[in-house]
Image (cartoon, rainbow, N blue to C red):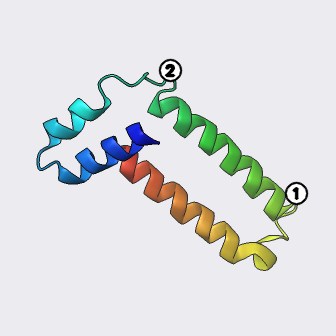
Amino acid sequence: MDELDERVTAAYAARYGHELDALVLDLPRSETSAAAVLATSLARLRTTLAVLLGRDGSGWMRHRRTILAIVVLAAVALAVID
């Protein structure tokens, strides 16, 4: 907790990007790339939409708000990654 507090305090005190970079240089890097995360997320999205819509597409009216929210979140995620 002390280390976390020190890093957070330093992050809030940072004024430039290179100061933030220095705070994470000693942390282990993730082996997961952004492309892999996106591919997994899109696969889950396809599965979720298939379940919500049903085989004949009749689920659209019952779940349209949820489906639209998922699509909007996916679009935002794509925009952030690019």
In this view, which residue lies farthest toward the left? 16
Q: Which mark is residue 36?
A: none
| Residue lying at 32% horizontally and 41% vertically, measured from the top left | 7
Q: Which residue is mark 1?
A: 55
In the rendered structure, the answer to whether residue 18 lies left or right of residue 45 reads: left
| Element type at mark 2 | loop
User: Which residue type does callout 2 highlight?
Assistant: Glu
Q: Position of residue 59 (x, y in %)?
A: 83, 70
Q: Position of residue 1 (x, y in %)?
A: 47, 42
In-front residue for pair 17/44: 17
Q: Quadrant of the C terminus?
A: top left
From the viewer's perspective, tell me whether residue 26 is left or right of residue 64: left
Q: Earlier in the sequence, mark 1 or mark 2?
A: 2
Crowd rating for badge 2 (residues with CA inside 10 Å; few <14, some 14–19, many 20+):
few
Q: Is residue 80 left or right of residue 9?
A: right
Residue 68 in percent (x, y) is at 61, 70
Task: Classify 76 as above or below 47.
Answer: below
Question: Which residue is at a point 16% across and 42% down the rendered structure image?
Answer: 17
Vertical arrangement, residue 34 with respect to residue 30, above or below: below
Furthest toward the front, the residue is 2
* Residue at 79% across, 54% down: 50
Instruction: Specify the amino acid type for callout 1.
Output: Arg
Determine whether 18 is above or below 48 in the image: above
Question: Viewer-nearest of labels 1 and 2?
Answer: 2
Q: Secondary structure at mark 1?
A: loop
Q: Which residue is mark 2?
A: 31
Q: Position of residue 45 (x, y in %)?
A: 67, 50
Q: In the rendered structure, are the residues bearing label 1 and label 2 in contact, judged by CB atoms less than 8 Å apart?
A: no
Q: Quadrant of residue 52?
A: bottom right
Q: Quadrant of residue 2?
A: top left
